[in-house]
Amino acid sequence: DAGITQSPRHKVTETGTPVTLRCHQTENHRYMYWYRQDPGHGLRLIHYSYGVKDTDKGEVSDGYSVSRSKTEDFLLTLESATSSQTSVYFCATGVEWNTEAFFGQGTRLTVV
Amino acid sequence: AQRVTQPEKLLSVFKGAPVELKCNYSYSGSPELFWYVQYSRQRLQLLLRHISRESIKGFTADLNKGETSFHLKKPFAQEEDSAMYYCALQGGGGNKLTFGTGTQLKVEL
């Protein structure tokens, strides 16, 4: 499973609270991605990173921020969680151009 | 901008029947295309990529640049093929990886 772990695996939080999800990899992959998976919408890219401190927005980045201070960790932060951010979040990593992306197990986040 | 469209949310076929999962894309450059599969309770994983031109588990996919399509095909569906299938496009300077909305394939006996 390419050494990708997400934490926490499940979280319930209240509206308006900040939440940080962590993706940790042991493979020294350069590229890292955060997606959310929702019924009818598939996987939508939130943010991605192409190196330490190099990040860019995906298609649904509003309300989310990321940080990558070292190769192995990619953090996703919801500054002030809303119910619309209830979803399953997936992290993925990639070695280089046109190669396989490896996925984490997912984090189920519920905002009440 | 890059975009991937999978028009079918659900595709139901009988065992032994041919399968075709449709994927169309929009991208201004030369795309790198993939099919990923998610079996029940498992991680999303790569099924195949267009550049390798290989057949995995009996599945093939041909890139048609004229029609901007990358449809996934299998001549005879098996029960174990039941899963969620995602078409994906990789492009841009940051190796941006964009997925379609997915097609749930159900193979019935």
Image (cartoon, coloured by chain):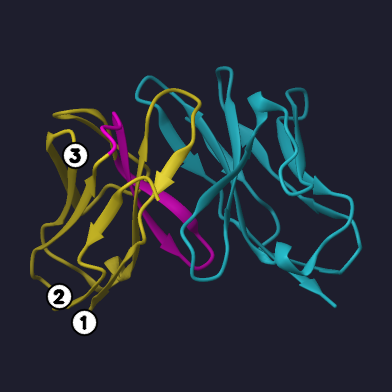
The residue that appears at 46% across and 54% down in the rendered structure is A43
The chain ID associated with circle 1 is A
Q: Does residue B14 appear to the left or right of B89 in the view shown?
A: right
CA distance separating discs 1 and 3: 31 Å
> Mark 2 belongs to which amino acid?
Thr
Q: Residues within 10 Å of mark 3 (few under 14, many from 20)?
A: some
CA distance separating discs 2 and 3: 29 Å
Say what secondary structure mark 2 lies in.
loop
Q: Magenta stretch? A: A27-47
Image quarter of residue A20:
bottom left
Q: Which mark is residue A15?
A: 2
Would you place residue B41 above or below residue B45 in this image? below
Q: Which mark is residue A72?
A: 3
Does the magenta portion include A34? yes
Q: Which residue is more in the foreground, B44 or A62?
A: B44
Q: Residues within 10 Å of mark 1 (few under 14, many from 20)?
A: few
The residue mark sitting in front, 2 or 3, is: 3
The residue that appears at 66% across and 26% down in the rendered structure is B52
Which chain gets the yellow colouring? A
Q: Which residue is more in the foreground, B40 or A64?
A: B40
Would you place residue A14 above or below residue B46 in this image? below
The chain ID associated with circle 2 is A
Image quarter of residue A96:
top left
The chain ID associated with circle 3 is A
Q: Which mark is residue B37?
A: none
CA distance separating discs 1 and 2: 6 Å
